[in-house]
Image (cartoon, helix red, strand yellow):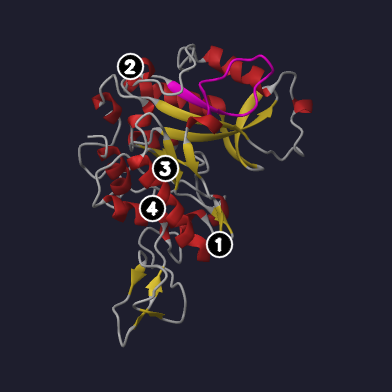
Amino acid sequence: MSSCSDQGYCHEGGVQLNYASYAGGNWMAKLPNATTLSQISMPGSHDTMTLGGAEWGPILLTQTMTLIEQLYSGIRMVDMRLVHIGNVFVLNHGSFYLHANFDDVLSTVAAFVRSNPGEVILMRVKKEASNFNGDQSKYNSQTFDQTFQAYEKKYAPLFWNNSGKSMNPSMQSLRGRIVVLQDFNGDVGAHTHGIKYSSFATIEDNYSLDNDQLYSKWNAVRDNLNKAASGPSTATYMTYLSGSGGSTPYFVASGKTLSGTYDSQQLTDVTPYNCSSDPYPDFFHTQCKLGFRYTYYKGTNMLVNDWLSTRKQRVGIVMIDFPGGDLLEKIVGMNF
């Protein structure tokens, strides 16, 4: 159990629970069978397997919980980036190998749903760029789609079979299964594996940003969360709190000077803002003195965590880097 389970942002490992009743290993079991995917508020992890220590550095690292810790913290959508090599899949973040393969992922998920048969795991499966000069075909004797079919057969019946081509199935048909969100081009004539990622949801994923664009990212995140609240119950919404590029994943999530959970917030500008015209009203502020105040960044995890404190609404699927237990709890709690 982590010591920062009462936070929206957490850069420590360990299961993230804040001792309340919603999140954890079996929260979906409490949902009625008739509940459809579009009706569920669900936490997910962005770049799920980019975890570990100093090896990756702040530019790449997106998670500090292991996969099984994420699942037992309430995460129900995972984000898998696969490279095809030797007719198997390995996990990459861009060109960086993550020291894991798809069998590691599937065996972990299979063990979790055996212990928690009322749960459903959504899994984005993306064909990732590799460090093989972009041409993976010469390292394989079969296509990416054929290798994926081999995994489906090996782990049957773990994968949900979308024989009815449903875009919005109910919990009754999904419990104990993986719902694939296919983010790769299948072979001509091949069946869709689960549901096409590109048509599954209204997605906010403005991931490329500099530090000074963090408030614009927050505006986009908040807009999509409001769409989830006001949109039709049959429509699914997915919001990524993550970002990088000129910034780092931990900074986008936290707004902190360093990655630690309790490190200090970074100052937006050395010049104080006029209290009546501060462009960042939702960030941290010092008290007004002589009409001016200093403003400090606040990351997306912290902004959403604060924002949800005064709301009870559907938020859809929320994809997170370094989630804290309080944020997970609030997202799951929207269902009950």
Q: Distance between the residues labelled 4 and 3?
A: 16 Å
In this figure, which residue is indicated by the disc labeled 3?
65
Q: How far apart are marks 1 and 3 (CA)?
A: 25 Å
Front residue of 152 and 334: 334
Against 167, residue 83 (above or below) is: below
Within 10 angstroms of label 2, few (less than 14), some, or many (20 or more) residues? some
The quadrant holding residue 23 is: top left
Amino acid type at image mark 3? Met
In this figure, which residue is indicated by the disc labeled 1?
210
In this figure, which residue is indicated by the disc labeled 4?
301
Front residue of 295 and 55: 295
Place of residue 174 in the rendered image (x, y in percent of width and height, measured from the top left): 38, 19
> Where's the C terminus, which quadrant?
top left
Name the N-terminal-most of marks 4 and 2.
2
Amino acid type at image mark 1? Asp
Numbered tag placed on residue 97 in the rendering? none
SS at badge 4? helix
Name the N-terminal-most of marks 1 and 2.
2
Indicate which label's residue lies in the foreground, 4 or 3. Answer: 4
Within 10 angstroms of label 4, few (less than 14), some, or many (20 or more) residues? many
In this figure, which residue is indicated by the disc labeled 2?
172
Q: Distance between the residues labelled 1 and 2?
A: 43 Å
Front residue of 54 and 269: 269
Count of marks placed on residues: 4
Q: What stretch is highlighted in magenta?
A: 178-196
Amino acid type at image mark 2? Gln
